[in-house]
Amino acid sequence: GGGPRTRKQLFNYYHSSLRNVIERCFGVLKARFPILKHMPPFALKKQAHIVLACCVIHNFIRIHSGDDTLFEGAQNYCTGENANGVQEGQEREAYNHSSSQTRAMDARRDGIANN
């Protein structure tokens, strides 16, 4: 089949899957709480409290609301579809790492994959 064949491929598959879940979670939070898109220049501790409060309110909504359209829309994001079922491009941030950082990350990944 087309599944991962090596430990490195398996690690990359799980890493990519986890990243997609995290991106969807942040996407839902940012859609629900626009302050998270453009955080005012508060002290770092206050910013952290704002993020935590948004997460608590989000979880409250999830627990007490049977119909959470933002969360359901995030499920479609995973497949690359918008609310109307139309394919959309997904933005990805480009990360520039030095060669020593890349080697360190590769060694860490290989260590995890080997375990």
Image (tube, rainbow, N blue to C red):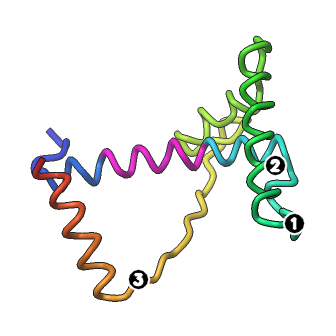
Which numbered disc flags the more N-terminal residue, 3 or 1? 1
Give the extent of the magenta segment. 14-24
Q: Position of residue 70 (x, y in %)?
A: 75, 33
User: In what element is the residue under mark 1?
Assistant: loop
Tell me what residue is drawn at x 23 percent, y 70 percent: 106
**Residue for badge 1:** 42
Residue density around tag 3, few if under 14, some if 14–19, many if 20 or more, within 10 Å: few
**Residue for badge 3:** 97
In the image, residue 17 sits, relative to residue 95, either above or below, namely above
The answer to the question of whether label 2 and label 1 lie on touching residues, with beta carbons closer than 8 A, is: yes
The answer to the question of whether label 3 and label 2 lie on touching residues, with beta carbons closer than 8 A, is: no
Which numbered disc flags the more N-terminal residue, 3 or 2? 2
Q: Position of residue 104 (x, y in %)?
A: 26, 75
**Residue for badge 2:** 50
Q: Position of residue 112 (x, y in %)?
A: 20, 53
Give the residue type at disc 2.
Answer: Ile
Q: Based on the displayed image, in which of its 4 quarters is residue 3 positioned?
A: top left
